[in-house]
Image: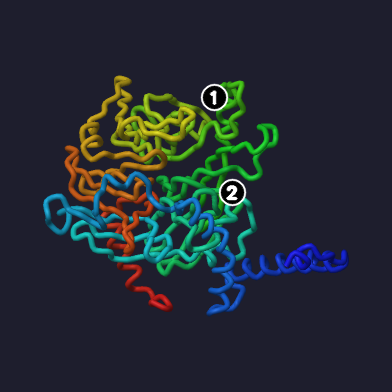
Amino acid sequence: MQRFIFARIEAWLVLLIVILGVGGTILFGALVLATERDGAPPGGFRGALMTLAETPLNLKKLLVGRDNRLAVGTRRFGDKSGWHVADGTVGIPGEGYLLLARYDGTAQVTTVELVDLTDLKVRHRWQPDAPSLFAGVPDNAAYADKHNRRNFEAVHPLLLADGSLIVKDHHTPLFRIDRCGQPVWSEASQIYHHSTEMDAEGTLWVPVHLQPPKKEYGPDFVEDGLARVSADGKVLEVRSLVDIYRRHGLSGQLFGSAVYNNDPLHLNDIQPVLADGPYWKKGDLFLSTRHNSTVLLYRPSTDQIVWRRQGPWLGQHDVDILDDHRIRVFDNNALNRGNGPEVMGNNNILIYDFRDDSLSAPYSVAMVKNDVSTFSEGLDETTPAGNFLVEEENSGRVLILSAAGDLLAEYVNRSADGQIWTTSWSRPVSRADGDAALAAMAAAPPCSGI
């Protein structure tokens, strides 16, 4: 054995092995890429190839012990799974629909479901096929790991009248998929992320990382921007939020530290103003930037920052307009003091009143009682019946609370194997809009394979 191990090997043989190894690696990578993009034949070969390609990832999961789609902080939920109605009935009377966005850990694919909140039944289900979405989309390192069904997440989907959805993951192109989950169009000129909202004109506002980012801002700088996109996928305008800050004398919020920060803003929500009010105008935009804990009101028509407030919210996500003088902010109450991310007790919901510059927290007791705690993401939205939705994205839980803060229903995104998986920014849908979309989908030809 010793003679075999220490035997001399000819240099030409070593070189041949290296050449064959490099060539084989390149060929294997090409086959995997073609397979993932539906360019290779299905069946046993396809499955075996992808299983082999995922070996390093599976080995990492075995050693590290956690899939990044698994929820965290879930021991609080005991053995709860699926929907649970607080009063033991089958649903919430008088409600509309919920567009429930979640990772289906049983099927191992991102899933969007239109749930009727009156009986908690799923009326339609979309499961976007990531390889089909990314077919023909230019390669980009920002979403190199999103091309497969397991990794792609449909973040904050938006339901359109024909039953199609606007979807994207964090840091991917923007897509429209039909009722069958198949692509209608893709828009890949920018890197889209976080919220998707429609304005009064029927166009979409979505946060982006500008492509290409300006080199003057430093290496690997994340240049946050605001993109307005039509429902048919045409980019109407893109504005750099970094440039807006600079034009308004706020460079200190970007570069005012001795330590370089390549992501000083982290835009996570754009909320369009749909009607004039005493403190804003139709077409204005409320913006939430997490990394400086700031909410601001921006007027695109005049390039004006009308109002800006930093804190008391910490690392907040989601700003909503309540009426003509109040906004509501989902306060993650989260920070990082060098020991990793932490929530300071619980999340909260803060209401700011423009009339008297006052803040209130009417749901603090409810948030503590229900132990709502998500370090990142998370949202709250008013439901069609005047209740409100709270989503703990990190923990895979959705709550429906009454206007008084009482728990009405709870959803825990648990798979068949008992694990809990993350949710992906769910959205209330009115009864009229949900019924219209369902009628349109029912009138259309059936989906192939369904």
Give the number of the disc on residue 190: 2
In terms of image quadrants, where is residue 436?
A: bottom left
Question: Alpha-carbon distance for marks 1 and 2?
Answer: 24 Å
Left or right: 376, with 58 as reference point: left
The image quadrant that residue 91 belongs to is bottom left
* N-term mark: 1 or 2: 2
Residue drawn at 44 percent across, 38 percent down:
283
Q: Position of residue 407 (x, y in %)?
A: 18, 44
Marker disc for residue 314: none
Picture residue at 19% right of the left edge, 60% below the top: 119
Q: Is mark 1 on a helix, strand or loop?
A: helix
Q: Position of residue 170 (x, y in %)?
A: 50, 49
Looking at the image, which residue is at 15% across and 50% down?
86
**Residue 343 spot, x, y in % from top left:** 37, 33
Q: In which quarter of the image is the N terminus?
A: bottom right
Disc 1 + disc 2, Cβ < 8 Å: no
Residue where numbered disc 1 is placed: 253
Residue at point 30%, 24% (across, down) = 359
Relative to 183, say whether 85 is above or below: above
Q: What residue type is labelled 2?
A: Gln
Going by the numbered disc 1, the residue's amino acid type is Gln
Callout 2: SS: strand
